Image (spheres, rainbow, N blue to C red):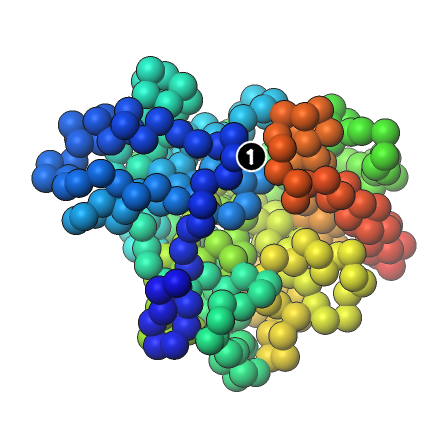
Amino acid sequence: MTTAGGVELDEAGAVRKGEEMDVTAVDLWLKARVPGLAGVPRVTQYPGGASNWTYRLEYENHDLILRRPPAGTKAKSAHDMGREYNVQKALRLVYPYVPEMIAYCEDPSVLGVPFYIMRRIAGIIPRARLPKGLVLDPPTARTLCLSLIDRLVELHRVDAEKVGLSKMGKGTGYARRQIEGWSDRYVKARTWNVPSFEKVRTWLKDNTPEDLATCVIHNDFRLDNIVLDPEDHTRIIGILDWEMATLGDPLMDLGSSLAYWMQADDNVLLRMVGRQPTHLPGMLTRREVVEYYCGKMGFKPETFVLYEVFGLFRLAVIIQQIYYRYFHKQTRNPAFRHIWIINHAIDRQCRKLIRKSA
C-alpha cells in the first residue's frame, strides 16, 4: 500500500472474478493513441462495481484509469461512456477538479463495450472507513465539509454555454422529469421483497416544484467521490464519477447528495448507505449543509423537504437497480445480496419526512 504523509493513498486491488478484460487488446488500442506509452500495464480494479467498472492501468511512464459499463441489464440512458467522457473533457476547461481525459473507444472489437481512459489523480478518498493514518479532528472535518460545498457551489456557477454544454440537458421541467423518471425506473426494477414506495411516489408527484434554476449538476456529489491532497486533507484536488452529470435544478443536485449524508443519530440501516465519514464529530449536519449552500448561492427555498425526500427515493431506485441485477443473476458480486433491506429503511425515512412537513 502506497502512503503519503503517513496516510494510505487510494489504490485498486485484484480484478474481480468475471470482470477480467482483454489487456492485450486495450494495450494495443491505447498505444496507437498515446505516443511513447511504455511497457505492459499492470491492471488492478477499484472496489465497488455497483455502477461503472473502474480499472487502473499502471504503465512505466503513465498512470491511467479505464472506465467501462457493467454487465447486465441497465437503464437505457445509463452508462453512456461517450457522454461521460465528453462532459468531463468540456468541464475541465473551467473546472480543474475534473480528471484529464485521454481517449474514448466505441469500437466493440476491443472490449465489446465502449470505454474511456483518463489520467489517475493520486490522493486520498475519504470513504466511510477512513484510510489508515487519516485522522479528521472536528475542526478539520468541518473545514473539509465547507470545502466540499464550496466546490459544489463553484460547479453550479459554471457557464454551461461557455464550455459547450448548454444542450446537455432537456430544458426546464427538470424536477418533474426526474420525479417521473425515477418513479418509472423503480416500478420496472421492483422485486417482491421491497416496498412499493407508492405513497412517496404520489407525494413527490403532487408536490413537484418548478425549477429554481438551471445549471451544470453532478448528480453524485459526495465525499467518497472526491480526491484529497495527501499533504492537505482539506484541499480537494479531484472530483470523480461524472456519469450522471447534466443540466438541471441545483437544489435537486443538493438533495441527491444529502441522501448519502448520514449523521451519527441516524438509524443503523440508513447509516449503511452513508459511504462517507459525515457521521464524525465536526462534520456539518444536513440542515447546516443546506443553510451554508443556500447562503452561498443566494437561494431562499420555502422548504427543502421535497428535495430531501426526492434524494432518498432516488437512492432507493439506484439500490434497487443494483439489486435487480443480482436478483436476476446478472452480476455475482456478493456485496449486493442483502442491499434490498436498506430500501425498507429509506421508505420509512421518506414517510417520516413527509409527515413532519404536513
72 sits left or right of 204 in the view: left
157 sits left or right of 34 in the view: right
Could you classify mark 1 by the number of other residues whose Cα lies within 10 Å: few (under 14), some (14-19), or many (20 or more)?
Answer: some
- The residue that appears at 86% across and 55% down in the rendered structure is 352
238 sits left or right of 78 in the view: left
Q: Quadrant of the N terminus?
A: bottom left
Which of the 4 image quarters holds residue 339?
top right
Residue 176 in the image: x percent, y percent? Answer: 67, 34
Total marks drawn?
A: 1
The amino acid type, in three-letter code, at marker 1 is Thr
283 sits left or right of 82 in the view: right
Which of the 4 image quarters holds residue 323?
top right
- The residue that appears at 86% across and 51% down in the rendered structure is 348
Pick whichever, 49 or 245, lies toward us.
49
- The residue that appears at 32% across and 31% down in the rendered structure is 23
The furthest residue to the left: 36
- The residue that appears at 52% across and 78% down in the rendered structure is 136
Residue 82 in the image: x percent, y percent? Answer: 37, 28
Instruction: Say which element carries label 1.
Output: loop
Residue with the mark numbered 1? 172
Residue 303 in the image: x percent, y percent? Answer: 73, 58
Pick whichever, 246 or 136, lies toward us.
136
Can residue 182 be seen here? no
Compared to residue 272, the image places residue 247 above or below, namely above
Pick whichever, 247 or 70, lies toward us.
70
Which of the 4 image quarters holds residue 157?
bottom left
Pick whichever, 195 or 341, lies toward us.
341
Compared to residue 31, the image places residue 41 above or below, namely below
Can residue 3 be seen here? yes
